[in-house]
Amino acid sequence: LLGIETEEENAEMPPAAWFEQAVKSLSASAIDNIKKSSKLIGGHLTTKGSLGKLPENAAIVGCRSFSLFLRSNMNWRIVPLKEDVIAKFKENCEKYGFDDRHIIPHGCYLLNAVSTDAEIFRKTCETLLFEVQSCEKLGIKLYAFHPGSTRGIVTIDEACSRVAKVVNEVIAQTKDVVILLECMAGQGFTVGNKFEDLKKIIDSIENKDRIGVCLDTCHIFAAGYDIKNKYEEVMEEFDKIIGFQYLKGVHLNDSKGVCGSKVDRHEVIGKGKIGEAMFKKLMNDARFDNIPMVLETPAECYTEEINLLYNLID
């Protein structure tokens, strides 16, 4: 490590390799705040080119965490990871200071653990298991996915039960990856736009150490949780219903839609309907320390947004 003293007891700077890359992108003030902060800001990165090089690409834009797709997010084709790619990925994670809980792979968009279509449900189960097993091979401890959609066919209670059953089966066949339920915006018939629904799923998970939540700021705002004007009330509600002990990841996005619009459209931080003030509260909230917080906005904006977010720290 860099050997820099920090104000936060648990804050740790990545190795010098990360610092040397990131300092080319981030402002001096952002770097200074990173040195004393336990906030792990990063972005969702494409694996086009080389999965093994991804940790280096993350460091170049100043990420301290990142997310990725483990395979195509728009088809069911499964391609096993090559051993040399796995080795290179692990090597670069160590080199650039990304530990096993700094990375949140994102599940394929086609997954629907609620589906009543036998073929889609089978493919969902197979793909979900493959992706979690891929996390294990890469040495990653977190994995987030969209719970699914009722498509208006089943009730929410039935949907939550189906999701829990699938997750329990995947957990039974894997070792230690924590599976994160992503909070949804409520667009269409998606499951997970209410904290109560996520709690129902969690309650039915047999191994509570293997389940968690990924909070998406755009999604919960669009779902009707007014984090812009009632930040603390929403966080207290989350803690009361779900519990912060289950918060393992965050997707950091502003919103193109207004609160309660159920419109899942991300905007660059500070340029949407949520606004910069809420993100300042979040960046100074100790409950979000040491949790990977990943941007899902246009990648060309990541360095600008990372600079902004770290400069919001008091």
Image (cartoon, rainbow, N blue to C red):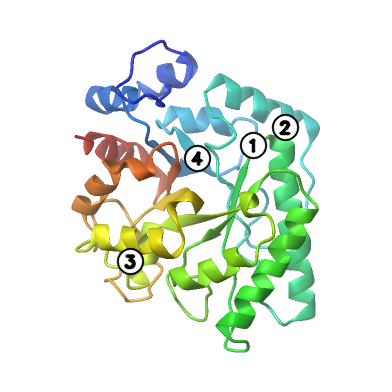
**Vertical order, 65 against 143 (above or below):** above
Which residue is outermost to the front? 240
Mark 1 lies on a secondary structure that is loop
- Of the two numbered discs 4 and 3 in the rendering, the one whose residue sits closer to the viewer: 3
**N-term-proximal mark, 1 vs 4:** 1
Mark 2 lies on a secondary structure that is helix
Question: How far is mark 4 from mark 2, CA to CA?
Answer: 18 Å
**N-term-proximal mark, 1 vs 3:** 1
Q: Position of residue 75 (x, y in %)?
A: 69, 63
Q: Is residue 159 left or right of residue 87?
A: left
Identify residue type, mark 3: Phe
**N-term-proximal mark, 4 vs 2:** 4
Residue 160 found in image quarter: bottom right
Q: Are marks 2 and 1 in contact (CB under 8 Å)?
A: yes
Q: Which residue is mark 4?
A: 66
Q: Which residue is mark 3?
A: 221
